[in-house]
Image (cartoon, coloured by chain):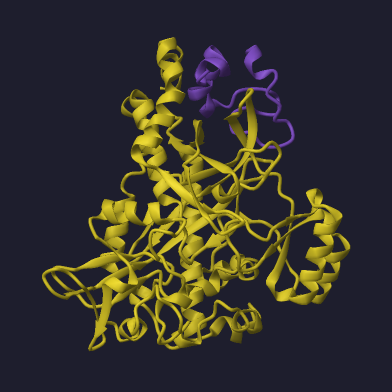
Chain colours: A yellow, B purple
Amino acid sequence: MLRSLQAYLKNMEKKKLQEIEKNCQSTISARGINFRVYAANNRAEEKKWPLDIIPRIIPKSQWLKVAKGLAQRVKALNLFIDDVYNAKKIFKDKVIPKELIFNSPLYLKECEGFSPKHKAWSNISGIDLIKNIDGDFLVLEDNLRVPSGVSYMLENRMVMRDIFPELFTRYKVSSVHQYANKLYNCMTECIPKKTNNPHMVLLTPGIYNSAYFEHSFLAEQMGIALVEGKDLFVENDHVYMKTVKGPLKVDCIYRRIDDNFMDPKVFFKGSLLGVPGVFKCWRKGNVGIINALGTGVADDKAVYSYVNKMIIYYLGEQPIIDQVETLLCGDKKNREHVIDNISKYVVKPSNASGGYGIMIGPKASKAEKEEMIKNIKKNPRNYIAQPLEILSTVPTITPDNIEPRHLDLRPFILTGKSTYVTTGGLTRVALKKGSTIVNSSQGGGSKDTLIVDSKN
Amino acid sequence: MSDFWKNYDSKSTFDGYISKEKKLRTHAKIIAGILEKYGKKKITRN
């Protein structure tokens, strides 16, 4: 099959190929695929989504193993979060130091003694993967709070199907389009009490959020209402949506708001984004919330270093996918080692996202390194260090040529009663030569990820 | 291996298309066909 596919592509008319890039840009504009970044003066700037037309290709046989490893990892993480807020067995057995968790700003004492339906806390997980020098996938980061990017994975495929239609109709490229259906099913599975006609909503902070495109895209794809906090209210410990026909009881909320802003009665009092009283409704089992509040406790780069141990502890299995070696600066010996060898390490804040606050030792200036050492000494728990992994590359179109560029991969895993792993994920690519920062907020681009059955 | 890939330098890390021995990976031949035949200038908009 591969040979015939190659022949098909080689025989494509020259004119058609010349149109590909042009079509790609116009399709992105027509579909309104964009994202928002905040400049230094805090002004929002809307940018067109950067898609490189040379796709990443992963053989299906390799992907099947990775998908199994991702499901395994997320299962262990969910068992861990449930254990943190309930039995606390893992601390009693001294597998993980409890101080690491209970001193974390992401631990919510308000969630103690509670389990969401199916004990599924991280319903939507985005696990960042990189390929090492041997071509094996490694986990770089676990994103369990409100991971974003899945809409771009879906849109990338829609654009590629528009510009390479025959590639997808004639050959075995695994589809990604089940995601919205699977997410909808996941939400219904997370409704605490069985109901015949469930009402579900996607709760967004609003149009100024950098991921608003994704919020509106997913709500539309699932056919559910896109709401802001002011559209919901609580009465008798049930959540209702305001509609022109009167209040409508809400059964499940896909929230894209951080824990602290969800309920001003319980968390940050000044929050105008959340819904007063929603936490109590959730704890009483009157509404489902995905991801569950408190999930962030496992989305912490310091906790990440223990996930392999969690897999062995909870599942009695060896991890299928390995992860990057990580040193916790909270440990005195590690801290001294990292400070003495700061030029060799990538130092990251434990609780940040979006690529912000990262120092890449081999490339950092003297001043940047000194600043980081100061920060580590001031708040050691907040920093981890990893050796600079040389991310794999894929040919990427540059202004002058086609050159290798570093990339990572964010697959998404849905967990309700059942588990679903996307086929592939969002490939993010660093567009600057030699850069390993792939975040779109910092100049990164993206590629479609094709899982191909190379046996045929 | 065609001339197209000779200037493509990815020896320092794992590359999804080209191996260290400068051979096209089997699964990457799908798209590499386009790149080899038409080159960058013809794919991108001038």
Q: Residue furthest toward the right? A: A340
- Counting labels gives 0
Is there any visible trace of residue A191 in the rendered image?
no
Q: Position of residue A75 (x, y in %)?
A: 46, 66
- Viewed as shown, does residue A138 lie left or right of A177? right
Residue at horizontal 32 percent and vertical 58 percent from the top: A183
Q: Position of residue B8 (x, y in %)?
A: 68, 23
Q: Position of residue A52 (x, y in %)?
A: 51, 33
Q: Which image quarter holds the N terminus of chain B?
A: top right
Is there any visible trace of residue A283 in the rendered image?
yes
In the rendered view, tell whether residue A246 sits above or below residue A58.
Answer: below
In the rendered view, tell whether residue A130 sits above or below residue A373.
Answer: above
Q: Position of residue A135 (x, y in %)?
A: 63, 40
User: Quarter-wise, where is residue B3 in the image?
Assistant: top right
User: Quarter-wise, where is residue A186 in the image?
Assistant: bottom left
Residue at horizontal 84 percent and vertical 58 percent from the top: A367
Q: Residue furthest toward the left? A: A245
Q: Nearer the viewer, residue A441 or A173?
A: A441
User: Quarter-wise, where is residue A134 in the image?
Assistant: top right
- Viewed as shown, does residue A278 lie left or right of A381? left
Residue at horizontal 23 percent and vertical 55 percent from the top: A223
- Viewed as shown, does residue A384 lie left or right of A454? right
In the rendered view, tell whether residue A10 sits above or below residue A48.
Answer: above
